[in-house]
Image (cartoon, helix red, strand yellow):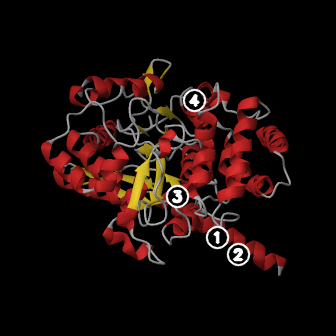
Amino acid sequence: MKKVISLLLAVVLCLTTLSMLSACEPKSKDGDVVVLTIPHYKVGENVGAILFLPQVERFNELYAGKYQIVVEEVPQDMYPERMKQLALQDMLPPLIEGVLDEVWLLEDLLPNNKILDLAPYLAKTPELREVLLDLHLEYNTWDGKLLTINTPIIRPTVLYYNETLYQPSKPIGDMTWDELVADLGDQKIAFMTSENAWTTMIPLSSMVAVQPGGVDLLYDHLPADNKLSDFNNPIMISAFTTLQRVMQAASSSNTVGAGYADAANAFMSNNAAVIGNGSWMVGDFAADAADKWSNGFDGSMVRAAALPGNVGLDGDVLGFGWWIPASVSPEEAEAAWAFISFMHTPEELEASMLLLGGSSPKIAPSADFLAQRDENKLLSEYMGAVDSDSIIVPYLWNSTAGSIADSEFGKLLPKLIDGSLTPEQFAADLTRIAAETAN
């Protein structure tokens, strides 16, 4: 039996490797057409597919006979590791979005000249330079090389609430978390502990931001070589104390063990009145998404507000965007750059904002864009939820050691909720685990 199992595992591994080798072949031409095969996760049910796949179609139509993008599906949680595996085989695809492991990019790809310098391409594309944010360009320039291109859209994560269940006594951004809990009465907040505890990490990030020194902590720990791994400090312990108090008082009944789908379902089934999330959730509240609703939920009753303390979270405030491996041919590099440039034209940026929310500071909005935006009350509210007085910070997830952010934080949360760990003990355990997993 052991031999049979071993043989089956070997066959599965072999088939997986062959699939990777064939599916991710980066170089191909169809006649005079340069074909770029891009493994990506923004397909199928992924929320990003509603923008990305139509963009690919529009690009292919615009450049018919010259360039063609072919998208192959990769599960989102496997995407970073898949790129690493392909890099080891010198088979990176010709265009990649983001790097969840910044150390890999800065300590492997960059020093080994495996990533293309995009500065010369940008210099030849002044219309693209006009819309890109200086903050992004400065962050993405390392050793004099422009490594990636970030989409110049700011999409703060905010708080959504269901007016059917809850009418705030004042703007939520003007409240503290304790005031929000008191204002909610018997209504609940959609938290989660499974996966990366996303809808719980959002409130916690805002709780950190309002602490004295919290904003600096979140920004100071963004660099890949300075991720937060010691949680034994007054800022984090105070934030954990608030989180424990809020979760004990107002967690939705399915919180422990809940993944993202469970938290979203709690909100869209009237079992929670509040959820923290990004702009991508706006589409879930449209009438054509009613198949996701239950128990009398009505998406038209959802409103958007800044997080308590007037906080908005932006995971892309600093980070890596689209990049091109140095192994591509000149023709492939030109095709990949054409797609990057296309995605960041004013027209495509407006399409992105209409579907996923956000604002692009350096483009003048067209009259058609403004008209369509104002037709969607929630989208318009979302775009106005944060203002120039808001505290805009990265997620704690972006500033934290990967082992903690990806899973360990969520694994420990039930003990914080049930009181078997004090906030100080919770901080100590996270610190210990971060040290152990770093070795």
* Residue furthest left as drawn: 367
Q: Nearer the viewer, residue 428 or 352?
A: 428
Q: Which of the labelled discs sits on residue 8, or is there none?
A: 2
Of mark 4 and mark 3, the one earlier in the sequence is 4
Residue type for callout 2: Leu
170 vs 2, left or right, is left
Q: Which of the labelled discs sits on residue 12, or is there none?
A: 1
Q: Is residue 412 above or below residue 361?
A: below
Across and down, in percent, residue 93 comes to 44, 48
Q: Nearer the viewer, mark 2 or mark 4?
A: 4
Q: Nearer the viewer, residue 2 or 54?
A: 54
Q: Is residue 143 visible?
A: yes
Q: Is residue 198 above or below residue 327?
A: below
SS at mark 2?
helix
SS at mark 1?
helix
Of mark 3 and mark 2, the one earlier in the sequence is 2
SS at mark 4?
helix
Marks 1 and 4, Cα distance to the nearest angstrom?
A: 33 Å
Labels 2 & 1 near each other (Cβ < 8 A): yes
Marks 1 and 3, Cα distance to the nearest angstrom?
A: 44 Å
Of mark 2 and mark 4, the one earlier in the sequence is 2
Q: Which of the labelled discs sits on residue 208, or is there none?
A: none
Residue type for callout 1: Val
Of mark 1 and mark 4, the one earlier in the sequence is 1
Marks 2 and 4, Cα distance to the nearest angstrom?
A: 38 Å
Of mark 1 and mark 3, the one earlier in the sequence is 1
Q: Is residue 322 above or below residue 134?
A: below
* Residue furthest front as drawn: 169
Point 73% across, 74% down: residue: 7
Across and down, in percent, residue 362 comes to 27, 30
> Disc 3 marks which residue?
274
Residue 436 image-quadrant placement: top right
